Image (spheres, grey):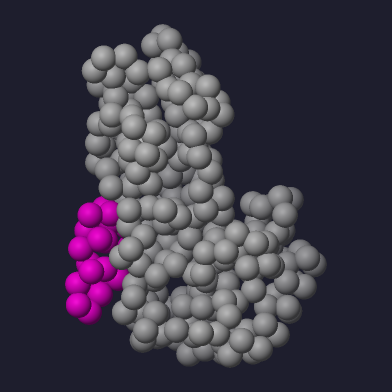
């Protein structure tokens, strides 16, 4: 069954009926007006199948997160007001901290990311009835097959001068730091992968879906790399908003969080209820 067929299935239709009732109950009008302008940002790194293409360009298909965002905004009647952009995280960080912020929504931010203090998450609640994440993803280590790697879930074998490649200022770098692993910063995920292949690093720590997709598509790459088990971590992924945008458009943001959660149910084994956050 396709993702879209799943979304239109009876189970999700029932969830949507519950959602509309919940929206009214918690004071989030289902017909919340669209903001004049909605600036939505995605990373410029490739995270297939979530985000496809590189740099400022969206591939076709653009990846699940982009498709889900368009679908959510379309269901809200606000797609025509939205401007979807891809840009480096360092630029997003600068624009979202300007006063007023020049970014409204950022789609694809991991729980616990160093970016977290700069944005507004939906209430972080891991109970199925209150979880408003877009998905839950594995973060894993990769190494060259000929490098004799070793990871048992607790200890990573690192010799003198060996480092872990991780994307700069992201949850991957934060996880490596928490483990006490020396890192080599990468500007993009692709850059981190190429550093591993060029033997500039001994390991790559990244979102497992990205590396897995690359290895499935490239037999030569799959012959060179090995994915180490178990995953290092598992983190929830969210659509987040600038503090300014939440203050200006609270009803819209709450409904967007709910709609994105519903879209994410396409890939969940157990769909979430995606109830709106309680009124504050």
Residue visible at 71% across and 50% down in the picture: 269
Closer to the camera, 264 or 214? 264
Q: Residue at x 64, y 74 (%)?
A: 275
Q: Is 218 positioned to the left or the right of 100 in the image?
A: right
Q: Is residue 275 left or right of residue 175?
A: right
Image side of residue 144 versus residue 219, left or right: left
- Which residue is depicted at the point 51% across and 69% down? 123
* In the image, residue 57 lies in the stretch drawn in magenta: no
Location of residue 93 in the rendering, given as x and y in whole percent from the top left corner: 25, 61
Considering only vertical position in the picture, is 280 above or below 88?
below
Is residue 132 visible to us here? yes
Tell me where residue 259 appears, x and y as whole percent.
Answer: 57, 71
**Residues shaded magenta:** 85-103
Rendering quarter of residue 190: top left
Residue ranking furthest to the right: 10
Percent coordinates x, y for residue 81 in the rendering: 40, 80
């Amino acid at each position: 069954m396709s993702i879209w067929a799943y979304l239109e299935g009876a189970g999700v239709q029932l969830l949507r009926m519950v959602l509309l009732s919940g929206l009214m109950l918690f004071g989030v009008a289902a017909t919340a007006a669209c903001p004049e302008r909605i600036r939505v940002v995605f990373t410029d790194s490739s995270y297939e199948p979530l985000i496809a293409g590189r740099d400022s360009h969206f591939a076709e298909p653009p990846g699940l997160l982009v498709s889900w965002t368009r679908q959510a905004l379309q269901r809200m009647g606000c797609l025509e007001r939205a401007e979807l952009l891809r840009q480096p995280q360092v630029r997003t960080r600068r624009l979202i901290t300007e006063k007023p912020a020049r970014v409204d929504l950022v789609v694809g931010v991991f729980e616990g990311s160093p970016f977290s203090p700069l944005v507004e998450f939906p209430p972080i609640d891991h109970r199925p009835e209150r979880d408003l994440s877009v998905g839950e993803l594995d973060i894993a280590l990769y190494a060259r097959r000929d490098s004799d790697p070793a990871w048992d879930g607790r200890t990573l074998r690192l010799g003198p001068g060996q480092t872990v490649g991780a994307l700069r200022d992201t949850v991957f770098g934060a996880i490596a730091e928490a483990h006490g692993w020396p890192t080599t910063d990468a500007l993009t995920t692709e850059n981190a992968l190429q550093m591993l292949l060029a033997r500039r690093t001994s390991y790559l720590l990244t979102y497992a879906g990205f590396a897995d997709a690359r290895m499935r598509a490239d037999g030569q790459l799959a012959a060179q790399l090995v994915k180490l088990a178990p995953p290092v971590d598992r983190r929830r992924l969210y659509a987040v908003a600038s503090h300014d945008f939440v203050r200006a458009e609270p009803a819209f943001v709450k409904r967007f969080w709910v709609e994105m959660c519903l879209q994410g149910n396409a890939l969940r084994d157990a769909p979430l209820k995606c109830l709106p956050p309680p009124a504050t």
